[in-house]
Image (spheres, rainbow, N blue to C red):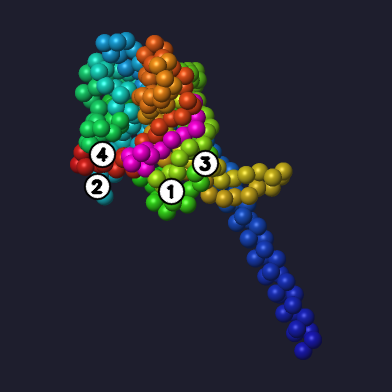
Amino acid sequence: MKPILFAWIILATVISFRVEAQTNQDRKNSLSKTLNRPRLSKVLVRNTVRIEAQTAKGSSIGTGFFYLFTPTATSLVPAIVTCRHVIEGATNGSILFANLGEDKKTRTESRQTVFYPDFEKRWIKHPDGKTDLAILPIAGTMDQLKSNGFIMDLKTFSDNDLPLPEELTNASVFTTIKMIGYPIGIWDSKNDLPVVRTGTTATDLAIDYEGEPKFLIDMAVFPGSSGSPIVFAEEGTASYGTSYMIVPDKLRLLGIVSQVCIFPASGGVQIVPVPTSFDMTAHVGMPANLGIVIKSEKLHEFEALLH
């Protein structure tokens, strides 16, 4: 019996080592896939575009971001989202797009500026008539550029990135957030990349500020930030010396920057649309470093217009 028992012990030990080796290899493969995946932050900075508009008052700059609408179970509508006041009164406009490389992962140095006559008329304004949002479907632009060998690099938000009601209920009142855009027109023009800024929510995300689907952020909001996405973003893989801890990325599109609070020279407090021009005579006053954000749930209401 002893030789048989000894043989079973040896066999069990060999199997255990093989299982452990396979488990370690699986972990290495999983880690390799995770580490080779683009960082969430590097994807997010490829989600926005710089919008330039010409109005009777001059030129203006705003921020737009890519969003993939799903008006039906079988249709997808790629679009750019921004604030309505960015494009109101615009006779002409232009948007700079980046080119996706042959590997379908990285950008090339090629850029294409698309000029749009009758700029305002091309946008679909929010159907309730008061929400400061507008969208520009871009499937036609994508096809036009593709026919010339230019593949648009766009990383889109979608319904999957919107927060669930229970997530808003459980969210901290002072949640750390990111704003992505072009404050004061600042951007990396060489690489066509926006600026990322950090702040916190200033009101409870689960509550509609002043009874409207909005919330406040504790962050300085400058001209050019209109239409900037406000996101909660945590990158999953974290390094600890030579080891890694793998957790899923966390991303939620919380809203869109629309207005800013200021102290005017006449006194009191005013809430005004975020300026799109850099003519500071438009609103004379001290900024309160508080921005007003439209909740991302309002994006759902565009889908009825896209059937």
Category of crowding for the residue at label 2, using alpha-carbon neighbours closer than 10 angstroms: few (below 14), some (14–19), many (at least 20): few
Element at label 2: strand
Q: Which residue is mark 2?
A: 72
Asked if residue 174 lies left or right of residue 266, the reply is right
Frontmost of labels 3 and 4 is 3
Residue 16 image position (x, y, % from top left): 69, 69
User: Residues in magenta?
Assistant: 208-220
Ranked by sequence position, the earlier of labels 2 and 3 is: 2
Mark 4 vs mark 2: give the one in front: 4
Which residue does the numbered mark 3 point to in the structure image?
174
Residue 252: horizontal and vertical position, in percent?
44, 43
Does the magenta portion include 211?
yes
Report helix, strand or loop for mark 4: helix
Instruction: Give, as a three-letter code, the residue at label 2.
Output: Thr
Reading the image, the residue beneath label 4 is 302
Reading the chain from its start, which is encountered first: label 1 or label 3? 1
Of the two numbered discs 1 and 3 in the rendering, the one whose residue sits closer to the viewer: 3
Residue 89, picture quadrant: top left
